[in-house]
Image: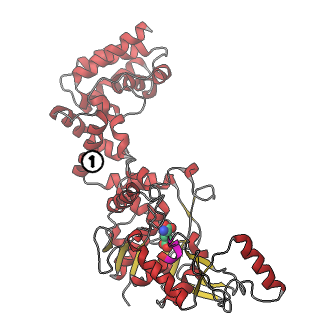
Amino acid sequence: MSVRVRIAPSPTGYVHVGNIRAALFNWLYARHTGGTFILRIDDTDVERSDVEYEDDIKAGLRWLGLDWDEGVDVGGPHGSYRQSDRFDHYREVAHDLVARGLAYHDPRSPEELEELRKVAQSEKRHPNYYIRRPDTPATTGPIRFSVPQDAPVEFDDMVRGDMRFEAGAVDDFVILRSDGVPTYHLASVTDDVDYRISHVARGEDLLPSTPKHILLTKAIGGSVPTYAHLPLLFGPDGKKLSKRHGDTSLRAYREGGYLPQAMMNFLATLGWSIGADRTVFTVAEAIESFDLVDVSKNPAVFDLDKLAWINGEYIRAQDPEDFEAGARTEIERSMGRSLAADDWERFRSISGLVQERTKFMVDIPDQVRFLFEEVAADDDSWAKVMDKEGVAEVLSAASSRLSGLDTWDTESIEGALRGMLEDLEIGARKGLQPLRVAVTGSVVSPPLFESMAALGSESVLARLDAAGRRLAGS
Ligand code: GLU
C-alpha cells in the first residue's frame, strides 16, 4: 500500500509552529517512503477562515521547502482540496448515514436531551434509547452520528502504542449542523476516506477525536488509516507552548532572520532524533532516517536558545557568497537604499568575520552600519565607556599613532594601537573600548582592527577627532 499523508490546517490564524512541525513529519515520512504528501485546507469554519491565512500557510511551507504533491493550488485526482468547496458532498454523506440508520436527525434542545437520557437511565436502558427511537425520526435539526456503544475502540498508534477507548466512552456527536454546515469530524473523515489517506500524523490534542473518526470511517465504508499522534510542544519551563515563551507563529521566524534550513532542522528535533548527540543534519539525512515509529511520545521542548544556536551553525556553514548575498539583502532593506560599490567592498573585507559571529541575519545591519554612515554612540554606551578618566588621552594617542601609518591594514593598525597601549601602560579593555565606541558607535562590533582597516584611515581619524570634541564638550 503506498503511503498517502496529509496536513489539514485551518486558515483561521497565522500558521502555528506546531502545525508546521506536523507538516514536516508528514512530509519527511512521504519523502522517506516515496509516498504522497497532500495539502488540504480545513475551512469548514467559513466565518473565521481567511485567504490571508491560507496564503500564510502556503508561504510557510514553501519557505521551508515542504512541497506538496497534491492539494490546493497543485490539484490532484480528487477535485478540490478545500473543504468549503465540498459541503454538498459532506451533506450527502451525512444523509446517507441517516438513510442507513447510522446517524439521526436530532431536533431536540440540550435540556430535552438531558431529560430523555434521565428517563432512559431510570428505566435501565441505554442513555440514548429514546433519543434514537426509530419510530420517531426527525427530519430537521443537526445530524448526530450514532456511536455504537457495545465495543471498545482500539487502535495501534505509531507513536503512542496500543490505545483503547472503552465502550460507552464516546457520546453521539454532531456531524452536520442544523444550518447544513458539516463539522470538522465529518469533513475530515470524509476527505481522509476519499483521498485514500494511509497515515494520519497529527498533534496529540486530537487524540480524543480519533475514536470518533475510526467509527465514522467504518460507517462510511472507508479503510481506517494508521494514526500517529505527535507529542505537543512545551516551553523550556515545562508548560504548554504559548506566546509567553516566544512567537508561536511560523511567520515570526520567517520574517525574523532565521534561515529556513535552520528552522527546518530545529523543527525536526521536536519529538524526533536522528541519533544520540546529533543536532545538526541535512534535509537529505533526515529523509533518509525518518520514520514515524521513531517519534517520541514525550513532550517536545521548543527551546529558542537551541534554535538560535542551530541558526548560527547554519550561517557559519553557508558559502561565503551566499552569506554575503543574504547579508546585502538585510542591509539594504534596513538602510532603505542599495549599497554603493565602495560600501559593498568595505563590507566584503570583513564579511568573513561577521559570518562567524552572526546568529541572526537581521542583526547584521546594526553591526555593520558604521561602515556606511556616521553612527553616534547612544548616551548609555557613551556614559559607560567614554565618560571615564583618561579617555581623552587614549583618543589623541590613537590618533597620532594612526595618522603616522604608511600602510593602512589590519596588521599595521594593530601594531600601532598595541604600541599605544604600552606607552600609556593600560590594558586592551581600557584602551580599545573607547576607540570602538568612537569608530563604530557601539560597544559591540566586529573585531576592532579589521573594522578600522575596512572603514579607511580618513573616516577613522575623523571619528576619533569627533569623539574627542564630543568629550570636550560634555
Ligand atoms: N484542521 C485540523 C487542525 O488544524 C486538522 C486536524 C487533523 O489533522 O485531522 O487541527
Can residue 292 be spotted in the picture? no
Question: Does residue 473 lie above or below 116 as drawn?
Answer: above
Residue 324 relative to residue 160: left or right = left
Does the stretch in magenta take in 183?
yes
Please name whichever residue, 184 or 449, is drawn nearer the observer in this view of the structure.
184
Please name whichever residue, 258 or 84, is drawn nearer the observer in this view of the structure.
84
Q: Mark 1: which secondary structure?
A: helix
- Locate the C terminus by quadrant: top left
The residue lying at 48 percent from left, 55 percent from top is 306
Q: Quadrant of residue 286?
A: bottom left
The residue lying at 46 percent from left, 62 percent from top is 46
Task: Give residue 285's position: percent from left, percent from top.
Answer: 35, 72
Residue marked by disc 1: 326
Residue type for callout 1? Gly
The residue lying at 43 percent from left, 16 percent from top is 391
Can residue 311 be spotted in the picture? yes
Does the stretch in magenta take in 15?
no
Task: Give residue 107's position: percent from left, percent from top.
Answer: 63, 75
Q: Which residue lies furthest to the left in this view?
A: 341
Q: What stretch is highlighted in magenta?
A: 180-186
Q: Does the residue labelled 1 lie within 8 Å of ligand 1?
A: no
Q: In which quarter of the image is residue 412?
A: top left
Task: Give residue 153's position: percent from left, percent from top.
Answer: 62, 87
Task: Give residue 382's position: percent from left, percent from top.
Answer: 45, 20
Please name whichever residue, 261 or 321, is drawn nearer the observer in this view of the structure.
261
Residue 401 relative to residue 166: left or right = left
